Image: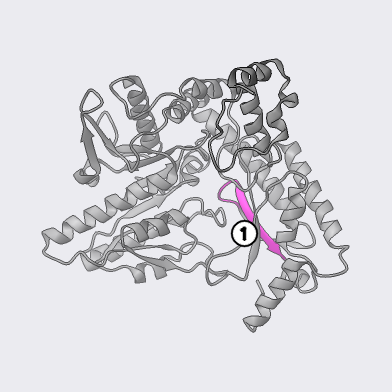
Amino acid sequence: MSQKTKTQENIATAVFGSAEMKQSAPAESIPKHKTAPEIAYQMVKDETFPQTQPRLNLATFVTTYMDDYATRLMNEAVSINYIDETEYPRVAVMCGRCINMVANLWHSPEKSEWKTGAVGIGSSEACMLGGVAAWLRWRDKRKAAGKPCDKPNLVMSSAYQVVWEKFCQLWQIEMRTVPITHKNPTLNIEEAIKMCDENTICVVPIAGVTWTGMNDDIEGLNDALEVYNKKTGYDIPIHVDAASGGFILPFLNPEKRWDFRLKWVLSISTSGHKYGLVYPGLGWVVWRDKSVLPNEMSFSVNYLGANITQVGLNFSRPAAQILAQYYNFIRLGFEGYKEIHENSMAIARYCHDAIGQMHCFENYSKKLDNPLFIWCLKPEYEKSAKWTLFDLQDRLMQSGWMVPAYTMPKDIEDMVVMRVVVRQGMSRDMADMLIGDIINAVAELEKLEYPTPSRIACQKQQKHKGRVYTH
């Protein structure tokens, strides 16, 4: 059949009557012939059809709902490359305005018209930029003092997000982690200070720990560093990884001192595509002022028609998310963000309480810092249970929910937990459906006559280690 005849057939044939629908989707080579757009669209659409619907994905932190106007703005800007400031100068202005607004939300002391910050593809890039700046500042000071620069280290809790492991490996920085334990579920400040020395580039507390949803005590860390730095003559700073908490604390706990109101906080990173309420990917990093952003991090080019200077690991990046963030700031305002996050917290507390009251579960923490929480099986229940939380995850997936089960970090890795992240788009009715599905799934699992494979594997692991897990 000629290409012309094939194309005519595609145009005249209903999508599901086409020859393509009888064949497997291309997997190894680009197809030789063209395909009608409606058929190509349907083929790609069908690949994602069986997946969990985004709003039922309670594993992800990223935004899964935006209003129609925001979505329209993003669709209309999908072809715009943010970095090309010559052709799209107003996008650069909007980006600068967003940085100003985020910086002022965090009580930036900088007096200049444009605050010192940068946009990233996500909070991972923002963390990287904050870490690189701390490393370069440390290196420059060591060089100026004639001291070696070959053994930099970074201190944070073991409940870190994987980007920090990547950062330390890529830049050859020793990662010193303070174990989180049942007694100290957040950063143990005393232990963190013990790990610091003249080679420490910064300490990284977390506002909104991915593993638990809790916040490190950033003000307490600042106070401890004030004493330590004064005693030693060092000037070890803080970079706050506020991927989640950076857009929660200012609205729900405005009186809490965790940001640039603290002396040793020199940089903060956050994710615009988490509780900034923008579709992925978008991150922001802000420095205390221009003096703490090393000049080496600014790169200039003139091959786009003008001299363009930028700070970032990526060069080209989509402008759509920047427009969406600016739209959110205008559309929602402070009150709108506060209302949305208050609702998310209320629904998270409702789920937290309902799950904590179930006979087989135990919440990890009594109170919520952010709209997410984790829980585990009660130790006494687990001793005789024929199932694990991994089995519950599988059962919930059958109802469309993605509620992750995972093991905790080193030192408490025997503990298996589940996590629910409540975001914009989660209603009380959806929460009731989730709780109902959990209750039904547990009831079915309790009817099992024999242990599940995951329970058998867990028992073997505990036996191999010579101990039985207790919380």
Specify the amino acid type for callout 1. Ser
As drawn, the residue found furthest toward the front would be 1
Prevailing secondary structure of the magenta residues: strand
Residue at horizontal 57 percent and vertical 70 percent from the top:
412
Residue 180 against residue 67 in the figure, above or below: below
Q: Quadrant of residue 46?
A: top right
On screen, residue 471 versus residue 338, left or right, reads right
Work out which quarter of the rendered image holds the C terminus and state it. Answer: bottom right
| Magenta stretch encompasses residue 85 | no
Tell me the crowding category of disc 1: few under 14, some 14 to 19, or many 20 or more residues within 10 angstroms, Cα based: some
Q: Position of residue 432 (x, y in %)?
A: 77, 42
Span highlighted in magenta in the image: 368-377
Q: Position of residue 206 (x, y in %)?
A: 45, 54
Residue at horizontal 48 percent and vertical 27 percent from the top:
324
Residue at horizontal 45 percent and vertical 22 percent from the top:
77
On screen, residue 323 versus residue 393, left or right, reads left
Front residue of 106 and 308: 308
Residue at horizontal 69 percent and vertical 72 percent from the top:
458
Q: Position of residue 418 (x, y in %)?
A: 66, 57
Residue 135 against residue 289 in the figure, above or below: below
| Magenta stretch encompasses residue 372 | yes
Residue 22 against residue 230 in the figure, above or below: above
Can you see residue 62? yes
On screen, residue 335 versus residue 446, left or right, reads left
Local secondary structure at mark 1: loop
Look at mark 1 in the image and give the residue it sits on: 365
Work out which quarter of the rendered image holds the N terminus and state it. Answer: top right
